[in-house]
Amino acid sequence: MLIRILGAAAGGGFPQWNCLCRGCETSRSGKATSLTQSSIAIQSQNGDWFLINASPDVRLQIEQMRAQQCFVETSRRSLPFASIVLTDAEIDHTTGLMLLRESSQPLKIYASTSVKRALTTGYPLFSTLQNYCGVEWLPLDLGQSIAIAPDLEMEAFPLSTKPPKYMQGEPGSQEIWGVGLTIRDRYTHGSLTYAPGLATIDEAMQRRFDASDLILIDGTFWTNDELPALGIGSRSALQMGHLPLSGKEGSLAQLAQLKTPHKTLVHINNTNPILIPNSLERQIVESQGIEIGFDGLMFTL
Ligand code: MLT
Ligand code: MN
Ligand code: ZN
């Protein structure tokens, strides 16, 4: 399979329109590479592409793929994705669906029942799209292997119980709102684990990561108090469902124990100093053999 990072930034992108933090200003000055919002795509051996999360930047991301000849297109109007997979119902992972409404076919969307509920009630994108291209919902159940292509099997595993902000009034705190995905190639035996929003790394997850060839993993924040310390938010990284990279309990320390996979960070927030070239934080990450994701980065497994 072929894997492409469409957008390596977290919600807001890099730079974020209303942010004057050091990273955003560095990016505006041209000294740090700008990044679009969180999304990846996978290609099967038969040529079909799958969009995993639909960011508000999906239009630009598709045009970047087209410019790099990622698609073989034969008709005047084509939806370049065989289906779409949503790992959660966050605004930054779903708003791009609205931009795909011109599709001449219904959008086939894999999502959990929780995500489907969110997108038909709190943020009714699915309901709205019914009057445009239509949505064909495909269930994404935990622990079940789904053949999305003859060569590709996808399995969802629980990542986060944090509901999107717009669903926070709902009771039931143990509901799984965010899932990770393991995608295995039956021909090459390559495997990818994608976990853009994780608050803890438990033993089962450690084993899953170590059984993968590539992990694309949450790199949202450097420290737990990153936003409050900058005076631009009240919630900690953990309260937002993101394990920070640094610290004794941080994700870097846990990733250091993994032997097998190539490790690449995605969903990186614009406040994270790892986005600034030559920063100490960036050097720490890279010295541990961990790659900092960027738009257009491709992998073959
Ligand atoms: C997240 O990744 O935690 C969310 O996208 C943040 C948000 O926009 O509420
Ligand atoms: Mn996000
Ligand atoms: Zn910023």
Image (cartoon, helix red, strand yellow):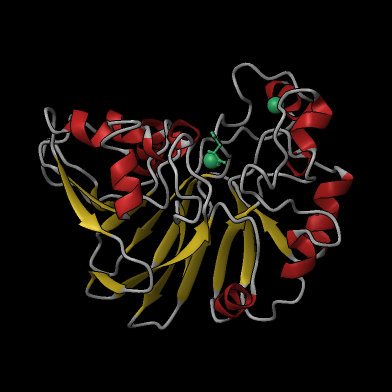
118, 265: nearer the viewer: 118
* Residue 19 image point, x, y percent: 68, 20
Image point (58%, 74%), residue name: 209
Image quadrant of residue 27? top right
Residue in the image at 57% along x and 66% along y:
215
Residue 175, x across and y down, in percent: 44, 54
Q: Is residue 84 visible?
A: yes
Q: Which sits in the foreground, 107 or 229? A: 229
39 to the left or right of 50: right
Residue 149 to residue 247: above or below: below
**169 sits left or right of 208 in the view:** left
The quadrant of the image that shows the N terminus is bottom left
Q: Position of residue 37 (x, y in %)?
A: 51, 37
User: Is 85 above or below relative to 15?
Assistant: below
Residue positioned most to the right: 280
Q: Residue at x 61, y 24 (%)?
A: 16
Q: Quadrant of ligand 2?
A: top right
Seen in the picture, residue 176 relative to 79 is either above or below; the reply is below
Indicate left or right for 93 with 25 as reference.
Answer: left
- Regarding residue 30, the answer to whether it shows in the image is no
Residue 296, percent across and down?
50, 47
The residue lying furthest to the front in this view is 171
Q: Quadrant of residue 153?
A: bottom left
85 horizontally vs 264: left or right: left
In this view, 242 is above or below 212? above
